[in-house]
Image (cartoon, rainbow, N blue to C red):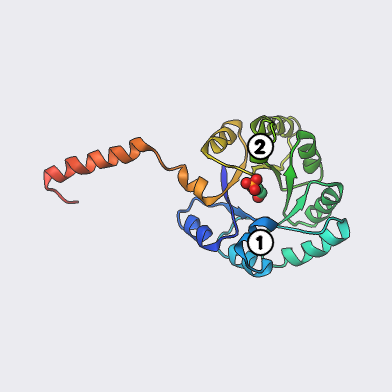
């Protein structure tokens, strides 16, 4: 399973990249706004921090506008993945861009039928938002399960990129279902390493080791 960082904070991305656990980055207009930086400049910097795909989202709602913005975004670096919303214009844009060899992440997916359309449009990634799905009284992980089943039924190559991840349980469930990628805030990814018994174990080993008076 690939791990993407869902942030435009370059310090956080650099820290995760240094662990060797980072496979890519996703951004969206809200995350760019939060960074307070210019989209082109920050996306270029992020693309230099990872060899993996870096999703940069279009703002336009119409196909022509999306194509115009995609042209600017994909020129930033070879590893830019253009992100488009799951609308008819977004799907049309996805088809045009992927036919041309550009990576596309179709975002804001909230149903398995939408994911089916994204795959038919040749999407490199589809982003179902599990956290927001849960927030609205739906079962986010059931959505991932349904998409996995449908993609496997037809051997679609579109990767399921589980987004809007809020905690480790989302990561665990996504892995059990066989999702291809999760994108999560760096704090959630870093939190996966924590276990009270690991800390307690290290503490115990160090205490016993101190009694030996040895060094390695
Ligand atoms: O990148 C899109 C997605 O991960 C947003 O997450 O927490 O704003 O629902 P959230």
Q: Which residue sits at x=28%, y=41%?
A: 202
Q: Which residue sits at x=81%, y=45%?
A: 121
Quadrant position of residue 64:
bottom right
Numbered mark located on residue 135 in the image = 2
- Label 1 vs label 2: CA separation? 23 Å
Q: Which residue sits at x=22%, y=44%?
A: 206
Left or right: where does residue 64 sit relative to residue 180? right
Q: Which residue sits at x=74%, y=38%?
A: 110
Q: Dot 1: within a 10 Å radius of its alpha carbon, few (fewer than 14), some, or many (20 or more) residues? A: few
Q: What residue is disc 1 on? A: 33
Quadrant position of residue 93:
bottom right
Q: Looking at the picture, how far across and down is residue 109, in whole percent?
A: 74, 42
Left or right: where does residue 168 sit relative to residue 163? left
Q: Are marks 1 and 2 in contact (CB under 8 Å)?
A: no
**Disc 2 residue lies near ligand 1 with CB under 8 A:** yes
Q: Looking at the picture, how far across and down is residue 192, in whole percent?
A: 47, 42
């Amino acid at each position: 399973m690939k791990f993407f960082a869902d942030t435009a904070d370059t310090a956080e991305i650099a820290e995760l990249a240094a662990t060797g656990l980072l496979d890519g980055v996703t951004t969206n207009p809200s995350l760019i706004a939060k960074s307070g930086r210019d989209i082109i400049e920050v996306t270029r910097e992020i693309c230099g921090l990872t060899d993996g795909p870096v999703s940069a989202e279009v703002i336009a709602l119409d196909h022509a506008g999306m194509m115009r913005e995609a042209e600017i975004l994909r020129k930033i670096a070879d590893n830019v993945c253009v992100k488009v919303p799951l609308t008819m214009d977004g799907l049309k844009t996805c088809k045009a861009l992927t036919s041309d060899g550009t990576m596309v992440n179709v975002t804001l997916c909230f149903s398995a039928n939408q994911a089916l359309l994204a795959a038919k449009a040749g999407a490199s990634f589809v982003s179902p938002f599990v956290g927001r799905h849960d927030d609205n009284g739906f079962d986010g992980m059931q959505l991932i399960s349904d998409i996995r089943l449908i993609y496997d039924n037809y051997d679609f190559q579109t990767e399921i990129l589980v987004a809007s991840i809020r905690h480790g349980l989302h990561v665990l469930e996504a892995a059990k279902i066989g999702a291809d990628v999760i994108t999560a805030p760096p704090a959630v990814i870093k939190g996966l390493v924590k276990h009270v018994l690991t800390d307690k174990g290290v503490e115990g080993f160090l205490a016993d080791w101190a009694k030996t008076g040895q060094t390695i």
